[in-house]
Image (tube, rainbow, N blue to C red):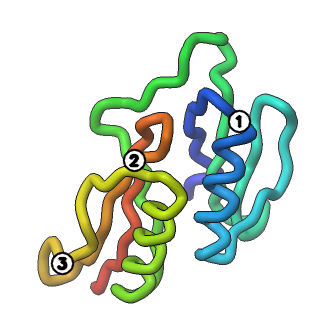
């Protein structure tokens, strides 16, 4: 249903390095873009994440209550991607674990304060 979601960043090069390394753990790569916005995903036919320097040239800010939830596979995959994010400089916002009987997740913030969740949902 979603085409793409944008994340405001203060340094596009540094953000691309972080997200490029992190999202490669899930089979995604940098797909296209320019000096202000870069798109990552597995294909342009699937949902994408776009990193962008805000168009209005004001500082990038993370939204209170805003979070990107990224399916990571099973619990071992969630653990692996979470560990990779921390290794790449993300800060912990909630270690991997079961949050309820059908949801296993882990939470981090990137260098700009954007909150990410890696998860498995068993329905």
From the viewer's perspective, tell me whether residue 5 is left or right of residue 42.
left
| Separation of residues labelled 3 and 2 (CA atoms) | 19 Å
Above or below for 109 versus 30: above
From the viewer's perspective, tell me whether residue 62 is left or right of residue 50.
left
| Separation of residues labelled 3 and 1 (CA atoms) | 33 Å
Pointer 3 residue: 98
Mark 3 or mark 2, whichever is nearer to me: 2
The image shows residue 23 at horizontal and vertical percentages of 62, 65
Q: What residue is at 40 percent from the left and 47 percent from the top?
A: 109
Q: Helix, strand or loop at disc 2?
A: strand
Pointer 1 residue: 12
Mark 3 or mark 1, whichever is nearer to me: 1
Pointer 2 residue: 109
Q: What residue is at 28 percent from the left and 85 percent from the top?
A: 123
| Separation of residues labelled 2 and 1 (CA atoms) | 16 Å
The image shows residue 116 at horizontal and vertical percentages of 41, 53
């Amino acid at each position: 249903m979603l085409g793409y979601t944008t994340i405001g960043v203060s340094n596009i090069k540094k953000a691309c390095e972080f997200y490029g390394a992190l999202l490669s753990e899930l089979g995604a790569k940098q797909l296209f873009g320019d000096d202000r916005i870069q798109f990552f995903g597995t294909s342009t036919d699937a949902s994408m994440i776009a990193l962008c320097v805000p168009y209005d040239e004001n500082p990038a800010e993370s939204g209170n209550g805003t979070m990107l939830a990224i399916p990571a596979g099973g619990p071992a995959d969630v653990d692996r991607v979470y560990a990779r994010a921390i290794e790449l400089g993300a800060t912990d916002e909630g270690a991997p674990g079961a949050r309820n009987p059908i949801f296993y997740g882990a939470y981090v913030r990137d260098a700009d304060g954007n909150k990410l969740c890696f998860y498995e949902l068993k329905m």
